[in-house]
Image (cartoon, rainbow, N blue to C red):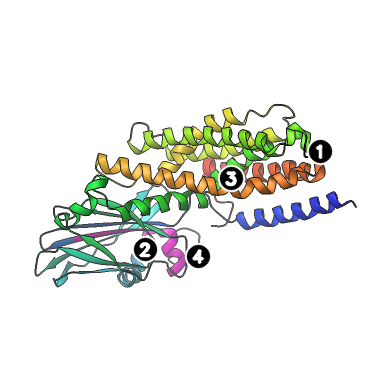
Amino acid sequence: MSAAQHLAVRLALLAGLMTAAALPVQAHQASTAYLDMNWQGTEVNQRVDVALRDLDRDLVLDRNDDGQLSWGEVRQAWPEIEALLTRHVHWQATGARCEPVAAPQPQLAAHGDGQYVVVQTRWRCDAPVQAIQLHYDLFKQTDPDHRALLQVNGTDASNQARAITPSAEAIELVSAAAGSGAAASTGGLSWPALVDMVEQGVHHILIGTDHILFLLALLLPAVLSWRAATSRVDAGSPPDRLRTVAVRVFKIVSAFTVAHSVTLALATFNIVSPPTRLVESVIALSIIVAAVSNLFRRGHVPGVAMAFCFGLMHGFGFANALGELALQQGQLAANLLAFNVGVESGQLLIVLGVMPLLWLVRRHATASRWVLQGGSVVIAVMGGVWLAERTLEIQILPV
């Protein structure tokens, strides 16, 4: 076996291991909680929405192990749910002592990705609340990817939204009067809040396996052309010039960026809001089309057109991360910009990580063929599984 064939085998094994590691990942099933803090005068209201699937993982709500969560099982586990949230989501008012007015009642709410438990609590304090020290470390030990979308509003609270991660450190929430100076230059938002949204955008693209595989399906033929996959081409010939390949990749990524940025904005401002199930199904279909086309195209690669057309639907998928935030228009625009900066930064990290590896593979015809064809087959299979799950509402991959 030649050196190139040895390299191809090793690369194929490595790609297989990486793909196997990604198989259990459910695209768009990221662990997200929603936390609303509202206060005015001496009264503070808090609402926490937590996904049933996350609570079931930590508390085993499905007592009869039938794969379904009933309302009776949720009510039976309510004391455990309330105790869990009390331990991991709590706060103190600066200069005031607060007491709960009434115990929260069991509730459920439907979000775009499933059923959530709702815990609403109301406190009354012995003095007007000027600031709150919020402690949030829910699922810190069991899910490192967990995020909470925090919304702060009310007569005495500066309206803002932040994406927070479980941490032992307290988050300070200040009144509108105290926070107006710090947030004046960002339309009512503080810089930490904008940084949080950038981080949320990076996080969303990096855990969005379906977005990553679609982008990878476009990058494979852009770098590993059929000419490189069928013959040993000298690195100095024009088709193998790094600049030529880099420009091709740039055009594809730019088309994808422009397309999903447009629909992300349209969805965020509620101008266009297609059904979530339709969006997720078309995203899965886009992965199949891009991957399967790699197996038959041997000439010009129309990656730019495909990236733009399907990128429009991927933008609606990105919008799901912001759809639950009810913000004022100025704040919504700032959050949208910050989130999109994060998405593009994460996308750039992926491209910069993948392109050098594909460029090295390109120098070997056998390895190029294995990676281009084998990688496309694996991506197409993953897209097919997701399409079946999303259209038939069944679960094939483990959560």
What distance separates the C-alpha of mark 2 from that of mark 3? 43 Å
Residue lying at 66% horizontally and 55% vertically, measured from the top left:
18
287 with respect to 242 (left or right): left
Asked if residue 339 is positioned above or below residue 68 in the image, the reply reads: above
Q: Name the N-terminal-most of marks 2 and 4.
A: 4
- Residue 217's spot in the image, x, y percent? 63, 40
- Mark 4: few, some, or many residues within 10 Å (few <14, many ≥20)? few
The residue under label 4 is which amino acid type? Asp
Q: Name the N-terminal-most of marks 2 and 1.
A: 2
- Mark 1: few, some, or many residues within 10 Å (few <14, many ≥20)? few
Q: Name the N-terminal-most of marks 1 and 3.
A: 1
Q: Name the N-terminal-most of marks 4 and 3.
A: 4
Determine whether label 2 and label 4 are within 8 Å by CB. Answer: no
Q: Name the N-terminal-most of marks 2 and 3.
A: 2
Q: Mark 1 points at which residue?
A: 234
* Secondary element type, mark 3: helix
Residue lying at 59% horizontally and 53% vertically, measured from the top left:
397
Q: Mark 3 points at which residue?
A: 351
What distance separates the C-alpha of mark 2 from that of mark 1? 65 Å
137 with respect to 159 (left or right): right
What distance separates the C-alpha of mark 2 from that of mark 4? 13 Å
269 with respect to 397 (left or right): left
- Residue 274's spot in the image, x, y percent? 41, 34
What distance separates the C-alpha of mark 4 from that of mark 3? 42 Å
Magenta residues span 45-73
Q: Name the residue under label 2.
A: 74
Q: Which mark is residue 65?
A: 4
